[in-house]
Image (tube, helix red, strand yellow):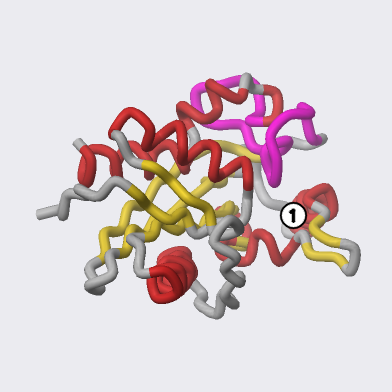
Amino acid sequence: MTRKFDGTRILIATHNAGKLEEMEQLFAPHGVEVVGAAEMKLAEPVETEDSFIGNARIKARAAVEATGLPALADDSGIEVEALDDAPGVYTADWAETPKGRDFILAMTKTHELLEAANAPHPRKARFRATLVLAWPDGHEEVFDGRVNGTLVWPMRGAVGHGYDPMFQPDGYDITFAEMDPAEKNRVSHRADAFQKLIAGCLG
């Protein structure tokens, strides 16, 4: 049985302002106030696990221990079938450069690896997001979301972020980066996980 969240305040273990705003809109109808990790001046913990749930758990537990508040954390990435589900949990790492993250570089690397492997079309991939909601007493609830699609090349679209310009979700003829943000947020991997959280803990 999923534990219901009956508090009025939750810590979102992220320093990403866009993600925090998304969470605010999600929790507002349920009378839950959200506060971000940056506002609480929390350091970003080192993500040492090799799974989405492992890294989300690190972030959620660190936030709970630092503040005593219930905390929600997520970890997400893209899995490419022909690359044995890489980059997966290392999605952000593939974009790292000395000057910060460069996802055009990461997408180009992905395309070049697929070409080198002579991977057949359609080149299937999925975005995944895992949410961990942690309470101060140690209880946790975990929700996994995903959206399936194919990779396209060249990149298309100027909105979105990360791998959005080369990911075309199943049932659409446009990429996430060509899609209206409201529509993308309705069908994305994170939306899938959020809907499960809302139904399980706030419904």
Q: Quadrant of the C terminus?
A: top left
Q: Is residue 160 magenta?
A: yes
Range of the magenta residues? 155-176
| In the displayed structure image, the side of residue 32 where residue 91 appears, left or right | right
Tell me the SS state at disc 1: helix
Front one among 198 and 32: 32
Task: Say which amino acid is labelled 1.
Answer: Thr
Q: Quadrant of the N terminus?
A: bottom left
User: Which residue occupies 33% across, 58% down?
Assistant: 133
- Whether 40 is drawn above or below 138: the answer is above
Report the number of numbered marks.
1
User: Which residue occupies 78% across, 51% down?
Assistant: 103
| In the displayed structure image, the side of residue 17 where residue 31 appears, left or right | left
Residue 85 visible from this viewpoint:
no
Front one among 25 and 166: 25
Percent position (x, y) of residue 149? 54, 37
User: Which residue occupies 85% across, 65% down?
Assistant: 97
Q: Quadrant of residue 167?
A: top right
Percent position (x, y) of residue 122? 61, 38
Residue highlighted by disc 1: 110
Front one among 68 and 114: 68
- Whether 3 is drawn above or below 185: the answer is below
SS majority, magenta: loop
Q: Quadrant of residue 197?
A: top left
Outermost residue, left direction? Answer: 1
User: Which residue occupies 61% across, 56% down?
Assistant: 15
Percent position (x, y) of residue 89? 56, 65
Q: Quadrant of residue 121?
A: top right
Percent position (x, y) of residue 196? 29, 42
- Whether 42 is drawn above or below 172: the answer is below
| In the displayed structure image, the side of residue 130 where residue 198 appears, left or right | left
Q: Label 1: how many residues lie within 10 Å, few (<14), some (14-19) or many (20+)?
A: many
